[in-house]
């Protein structure tokens, strides 16, 4: 009789020991989040996935070269497919590097924020900075877009993804734009500190 009871209780005990999946985090960015120039698993999003497992699931839907317009066109499918609880929105750097109008970038990012919030998805906005050669005025306008959107929408916010090493050229790959593998853990910790899940 005891063996029969044990067999009945064993599946329940196994379920009790496996932690429930608390949240799905969707990382939606460009090459900075896609791990450009790195080996698979070296990027900050992959490191975040390992850091949060097994409690939370991290899905990286980032695409190298992506602009805010490209992200806007892809986001509906990504939300439908992955059904995230949290959207880590890291886009806009390529808009700035291409000299695109800030009003267009702001509008695209706002529409993505609206789209996520309409589905009760929490948004963590991740900002960037442009290289100094783009000029102080354009660089300031670029940074201001993120500040304004974060404040207006009351978002969790990382003002600068490369915080802590932005001025250290040795922390970047030869192109001077993409952080090296050794810098990814710093980026991961910067994002994790503002992530609305623990």
Image (spheres, helix red, strand yellow):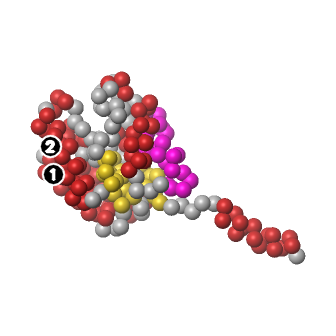
Q: Which residue is drawn at 34% across and 31% down?
A: 165
What is the number of the mark on residue 79? none
Instruction: Give the structural element (helix, strand or loop) at label 1.
Output: helix
Residue picked out by circle 1: 104
In the rendered image, is residue 118 in sight?
Answer: yes
Q: Which residue is drawn at 22% across and 32% down?
A: 131
Tell me residue 26's x, y (percent).
Answer: 40, 54
| Image quarter hosting the N terminus | bottom right
- Closer to the camera in the image, 75 or 185: 185
Q: Which residue is drawn at 32% across and 24% down?
A: 169
Q: In this view, does 49 lie above or below 78?
A: above
Q: In this view, does 4 lie above or below 187?
A: below
Disc 1 versus disc 2: nearer the observer: 2
**Horizontal side of residue 18 vs 65, given as left or right:** right
- Closer to the camera in the image, 86 or 66: 86
Q: In this view, does 54 lie above or below 128?
A: below
Is 110 colored magenta in this rendering?
no
Residue picked out by circle 2: 141
Tell me residue 40's x, y (percent).
Answer: 48, 38
Alpha carbon distance from label 1 to label 2: 13 Å
- Closer to the camera in the image, 170 or 158: 158
Is 50 colored magenta in this rendering?
yes
Tell me residue 54's x, y (percent).
Answer: 56, 53
**Horizontal side of residue 92 vs 35, given as left or right:** left
Residue 153, quarter of picture: bottom left
Work out whether mark 1 precedes mark 2 in sequence or the reverse, and give the earlier one.
1
Instruction: Give the structural element (helix, strand or loop) at label 2.
Output: helix
Q: Residues within 10 Å of mark 1 (few under 14, many from 20)?
A: few
- Closer to the camera in the image, 49 or 175: 49
Q: What stretch is highlighted in magenta?
A: 38-57
């Amino acid at each position: 009789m005891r063996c029969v009871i044990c067999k009945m209780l064993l599946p329940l005990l196994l379920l009790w020991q496996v932690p429930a999946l608390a949240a799905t985090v969707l990382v939606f960015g460009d090459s900075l989040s896609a791990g450009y120039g790195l080996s698979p698993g070296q990027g900050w999003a992959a490191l975040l996935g390992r850091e949060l497992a097994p409690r939370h699931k991290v899905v990286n839907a980032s695409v190298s070269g992506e602009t805010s317009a490209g992200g806007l066109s892809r986001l509906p499918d990504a939300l439908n497919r992955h059904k995230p609880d949290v959207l880590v929105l890291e886009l806009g750097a390529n808009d700035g590097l291409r000299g695109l109008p800030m009003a267009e970038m702001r509008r695209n990012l706002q529409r993505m924020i609206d789209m996520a919030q309409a589905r009760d998805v929490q948004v963590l906005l991740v900002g960037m900075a442009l290289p100094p050669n783009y000029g102080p005025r354009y660089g300031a306008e670029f940074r201001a877009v993120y500040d304004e959107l974060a404040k207006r929408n009351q978002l969790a916010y990382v003002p600068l993804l490369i915080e802590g090493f932005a001025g250290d050229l040795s922390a970047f790959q030869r192109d001077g734009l993409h952080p090296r593998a050794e810098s990814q853990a710093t980026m991961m910790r910067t994002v994790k500190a503002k992530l609305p899940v623990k």
